[in-house]
Image (cartoon, rainbow, N blue to C red):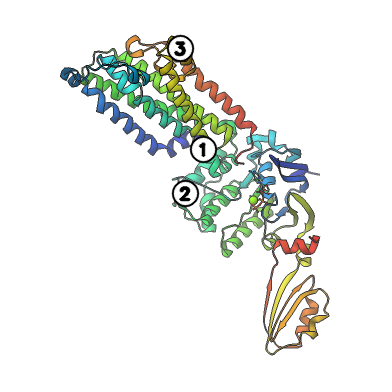
Amino acid sequence: MTAPAIRVAGLSKNYGKHVALTDLNLEVQPGEVFGFLGPNGAGKSTTIRILLDLIRPTAGRIEVLGTDPRTGGAALRERIGYLPGELEIEGRNTARELLGFLADQRGTVAKRRIEELAELLDLDLAKHVGKMSKGNKQKVGIIAAFMHRPDLLVLDEPTSGLDPLLQQRFLGLVREAADNGQTVFMSSHILSEVQDTADRAVIMRAGKLLGTENVEDLRRRSPRSVELVFAEPVDEAEFAGLPGLRDLHVDGRTLKCTTEGEVDDLFKAAAKHRIQSVLSTEPDLEAIFFSLYGR
Amino acid sequence: MTRSIFTQTLKEQRRGLIGWSIALFAVPMMYVPSYESFAEQGALDMEGGGIYDAMGMGDFNTAAGYLDSTMFSLMGPLLLLIFAITFGARTASQEESGTLDLILAQPVSRTKVLAQRFAALTVQTAIVTGVFGAAILAGASAGNMDLPAGNILAAVVGTGLLALAFGAITQMVGALTGHRASAIGISAIIAVAGYFANNLGGMDPDTEWLRYLSPFYYATGDSPLTNGWNLGLIAVLVILPMATLALSLSTFNRRDLAV
Ligand SMILES: Nc1ncnc2c1ncn2[C@@H]1O[C@H](COP(=O)(O)OP(=O)(O)OP(=O)(O)O)[C@@H](O)[C@H]1O
Ligand SMILES: [Mg+2]
């Protein structure tokens, strides 16, 4: 039985009078991809920066790879790759110079690794980091986190600023890390990017944990807004009584509703007509909270 | 070559360092070599008194007085302090921008970051002070100043150490607060207060104790251009940055970063 990659017990953090985290409990197993979900201001970055010993907890016990980050120091950070949230990089360095400098602090980065990652993420290493767009800075941060193949990756909103194609490439990197047996702890306020890769996820809001969820369950149970366009006008009454359907609204050929759980009933009813198009959008986290945990 | 925080800091600030070196070479070159011609024209036969004393500029008429008034009373310390204070704010400004998060995600301790930054600041201060000193020595020789080079060096070294002390104070306020503006602002206030404490304290025996509180006193308080080295005073300026660094390290290690 190996120790958890991350264990957080009774963690609280106040910024002066402002309470950012209350009594957080969390365990991440080695080799797991773990999603850390929550809307803006939930306390994700606060938790993550405590794991990295950038800030200190007000109360609680923390173990990262079996060590208290407070005492683990540099030796512990050798085994961690961290991508800061709201990453800001200044300076006249080119990406190559900056990443080379960061790699030198470790001395364990394989020679071609930075180039490989840059190619994968479509990053021009000769550009000056200070002048880069947000997305390109984010790529630099991702490379810095992944380059030394750490045992634990702690990623704070890793896909923010990346376009959809690169989000996919990034998720590929996460999967590759997971296949290597590395542990990944990533925060997000978007369920879909976590659900594609994560085994488990927690949801937090206002400094409190709402529950640990199997990501599949979460996805199945979360509400989804669906828009169907039919070839001819349909009657609202046909759909009105269906289970798991809310906010039904039919306007001529267009049906809009919110579904919870399986969409089987809706589609069977709809299949009696010719369907021209289907649009199903994922709800944001707030909507999920609302439906899972009430107000 | 393996890059360290130390070498990387020197590299990242090299342009600034070159700029400051040029300024600290040019300024003595504008004033010092003209001593001889000014003295021959009698342009320096002016009465000192009140306002000049308050600015630490006692007398222009001797070589030592001229050099002290033009270079070591105000201009030299002013430039070197502005240099050291802006360079000393480096870590605080990186903390504020968020870049420090990325550096500290690597296996380097906070102590190492700050200590190597201090080492870089020491080297940078030594370089600009060296340039400043070389320019003065060259200027003094061109202007036929009859001053022992050792005395000039004593004044230069004292002023350089003074600058280092203020760089260290800036770094300490930065380590304490994490804000670039506080680091620079508070050090600048201490510098201005120290400057006046030294000069006003020197004018009146009743307030003479004020001088001893001022770092400026330990740089040029014993008139090194006339009296040469005063190792006791210099020692204070060696210890001051060290003690400041020790304080910086202990507070920096205890604090929440970038909040
Ligand atoms: N330095 C600070 N001083 C005071 N309050 C802070 C500070 N940093 C964060 N907070 C507060 O703590 C709470 C948690 O913030 P945190 O940055 O951890 O949220 P987050 O989940 O990362 O949000 P986001 O998705 O916007 O990044 C918020 O209410 C925030 O306002
Ligand atoms: Mg955040």
Front-most of residues B206 and B254:
B206
What residue does disc 3 label? Answer: B208
Q: Is residue B73 visible?
A: yes
Inspect the image, locate mark 1, and give the three-letter code of the amino acid beneath it. Answer: Arg
Between residue B175 and residue A269, name the one nearer to us: B175
Q: Is residue A143 above or below residue A248?
A: above
Q: Nearer the viewer, residue A246 or B54?
A: B54
Say which of marks 1 and 3 sits in front. 3
The verdict on a common chain for dots 3 and 2 is: no
Q: Are marks 3 and 2 in contact (CB under 8 Å)?
A: no
* Horizontal and vertical percent position of residue A267: 76, 80
Between A22 and B22, the one lying in front of the other is A22
> What amino acid is found at the position of numbered circle 2 in the picture?
Gly
Element type at marker 2? helix
In this rendering, is residue A288 above or below B161?
A: below
Q: Which residue is mark 1?
A: B180
User: Could you tell me residue B152's position as x and y percent?
Assistant: 32, 16
User: The disc numbered 2 marks a residue on which chain?
Assistant: A
Closer to the chain start, of discs 1 and 3, is: 1
Q: CA distance from mark 2 to mark 1?
A: 18 Å
User: Which image quadrant for residue A249?
Assistant: bottom right
Could you tell me which secondary element the residue under label 1 belongs to? helix
Residue that carries the numbered disc 2 in the rendered image? A130
Q: In the image, are marks 1 and 3 on the same chain?
A: yes
Corner quadrant of residue A157: bottom right
Label 3 crowd bin: few (<14), some (14–19), many (20+), radius 10 Å:
some
Q: Give x and y (percent) for residue B104.
A: 59, 39
Q: Are marks 2 and 1 on the same chain?
A: no
